[in-house]
Amino acid sequence: MSARTRAIVGVAVMSVLLVLYFVFAGVRAVALLASGTPVAIAMGVALIVLPLIGAWALARELIFGMRSTALVDELDRQDLLPDDLGEATPTGRADRDTADAVFARYREETEAEPDDWRSWARLGIVYDACCDRKRARAAMREAISRRRGGPERP
């Protein structure tokens, strides 16, 4: 099974489990609301609101995952993925030391062409290889934003 297939299966399983939790919490919330006591009603409202926030967060993460995967796939089709991250480890991740060594190149590329979504996406990939997940996600969000808002460039 490929790493991508394992990731998709993992996301699907976790999403189904989370949706089941939302359903069970919703059923319990309705029961609490029907009880009529003020404390139970307050708990019922909380049990409705919290799963709604969770559903919003799940949808947001799934959309981010689909959009970022589409950008990486497009970079791959254009043969523009970072190719200097070294051999992947047995877990499929890039070697962090190699990624740290080439990071400056991708940062400078992005600074030189801040409007190019491709440079932001490559920077996000390298940030992820450097194990800086927060900046990787921010760079990929920037790439998604620039890809959606700007005209296609060769």
Image (tube, helix red, strand yellow):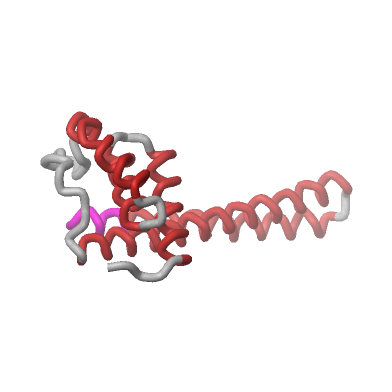
* Residue 5 belongs to magenta span: yes
Q: Quadrant of the C terminus?
A: bottom left
Q: Position of residue 66 (x, y in %)?
A: 39, 62
Q: Quadrant of the N terminus?
A: bottom left
Q: Is residue 77 above or below residue 138?
A: below
Q: Quadrant of residue 7?
A: bottom left
Direction from residue 108 to residue 81 in the image, left or right: left
Image: 14 above or below 130: below
Which residue does the image show at 13% across and 40% down from the upper left?
86
Q: Nearer the viewer, residue 115 or 88?
A: 115
Instruction: Give coordinates of residue 150: x percent, y percent.
Output: 44, 66
Observer-nearest of 79 and 151: 151
Q: Residue at x 31, y 40 (%)?
A: 108
Q: Position of residue 58 (x, y in %)?
A: 51, 56
Residue drawn 20% across the image and 65% down it: 78
Residue 59 location (% of width, % of height)? 52, 60
Q: Residue furthest left?
A: 87
Give whichever of 91, 16 is nearer the camera.
91
Q: Describe residue 129's horizontal placement relative to residue 134 as left or right.
A: left
Please state the extent of the stretch shown in magenta in the rendering.
Answer: 1-8
Looking at this rendering, what residue extends furthest in the front direction?
112
In the picture shown, does residue 133 fall above or below 81? Answer: above
Report the magenta stretch's main SS: helix
Q: Residue at x 17, y 60 (%)?
A: 79
Answer whether residue 65 is magenta in the image.
no
